[in-house]
Image (cartoon, grey):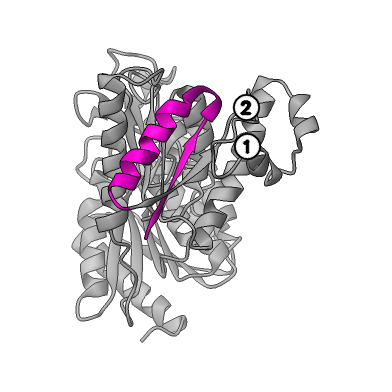
Amino acid sequence: MKTVAIIESLDTKLDESLFAAECINKQGLNTLLIDNSTWNLDVEKGDITPLEVLAYASVDREAFLRLNKPEKIAAMTAGLEKLIPELYAQGKIDGVMSVGGGQNGAMAAPAMKALPFGVPKVLSSALACGSREMEQFVGEKDIFVVPTVADIAGLNPITKTLIRSVCAAVTGLVQYGEIYHQTGDHKIIAATMLGETTKGTMEALRLITEGTDYEQVVFHANGVGGRCMEALIEEGQINAVLDYTLHEIVCELFGGYCAGARNRLLKSLEYGIPTLVVPGGLDMNDYYNESTGAWLPKDFKERKSVLHNANIWHSKITRAEAEKLVKVVCERLGTAVKPVTLVVPTKGCCQTTAVGGPIYDPEIDELMVRAFKEQVPPNVKLVVAESGINDPEFAAVVAEEFKLLLKEYGWN
């Protein structure tokens, strides 16, 4: 019989937690009620007590009682973050859920993020709505998030309906969901892409994978997609990387609409899997529409810019930004533990900066190509292609170089 872990603060949500466990038990699943209370450590209704959770953070009762409220929450969070993945690794739980307010969600979310991709995770919080960012609840993981609508403060027709719905969701995922694993030689190649680099990325992937058993997974380089790819590299679910779009590094260094990824590019280099890099989107930034003004740089009117849609501007980078970006990319490439290939186009790194595009700037392009030639580390094979990033001939060069790299790594 499969088991669902329920993370709840029993000192404030006892009746609601017992109702959730009852809902899941009626569906034929076991429950493991994990008490993450920070006010009363002795409710004695949970299967795992707060003190048992705290032990995973090396915090005992006396030390915990000396902490202030934020410190208590941090200690309990740290304990859950170690406990939950251990329970899953030991086969003691098959999924996890949590229903509560902001504090319970803040403690439960990091524990869910510590679980592998595909493990059922459902989090319901009173703060999962409005203008609040979803980063705190989701990060790079596949967490189902549900706003509670009403605060979870007693059982009534509204809260009972919500709790039962969350329980039905996690029960369905545990009973009927499935984690698909690699089989045989079906190796997985990850690629990064934006709308601005779609044509080139997809053509290169087609040329790489046709006639093979390779499978492709594409990540949207929007500030989260690159992070998700790198989290899956850490989990061992990616075998090779076509990092076609480095746009997130622009926003990482200078701010922009696609900010959010940190230290992009490093993970595949650290894990030593085949990696071919293309500086897709490295020559432009994204900003909110001028009508909002909040994200526009002071020199915006001096930049070559074009509206991407009603809300977003694409702007060509400056010379100083180009120099900084090439320097950072080359420094990160220098950390590679195994051979890496870098393929650089000479005629624009995305659709709008290509020849004939609205923010084409050959001087910046020439500067970037020259800087890459001067700074590329010795462990990286540099290939310069006289074309734009979405041109079929560029995709063909990328595909051929990627195949050569795979052979160097022993792929058939």
Q: Which one is nearer the viewer's eye here, 119 or 395?
A: 119
Task: Indicate the position of residue 279 as horizontal and vertical percent values.
Answer: 40, 52
Residue at 34 percent across and 67 percent down: it is 189
Q: Residues within 10 Å of mark 2 (few under 14, many from 20)?
A: many
Q: Quadrant of the C terminus?
A: bottom left
On screen, residue 389 above or below 159: below
- Secondary structure at numbered mark 1: helix
Would residue 310 be seen by someone viewing this image from the given angle?
Answer: yes
The amino acid type, in three-letter code, at marker 2 is Thr
Q: Is residue 62 above or below residue 329?
A: above
Residue under label 2:
38
Q: Which mark is residue 100?
A: none
- The x, y position of residue 23, in whole percent, is 31, 40
Q: Is residue 159 magenta?
A: no
Taking the image as drawn, is residue 361 in sight?
Answer: no
**Pick the front one: 203 or 272:** 272
The prevailing secondary structure element of the residues shown in magenta is: helix
Q: Which portion, as a residue range, is magenta? A: 1-28
- Are circles 2 and 1 on residues that touch, CB within 8 Å? yes
Residue bearing the label numbered 1: 50
Residue 390's image quarter? Answer: bottom left
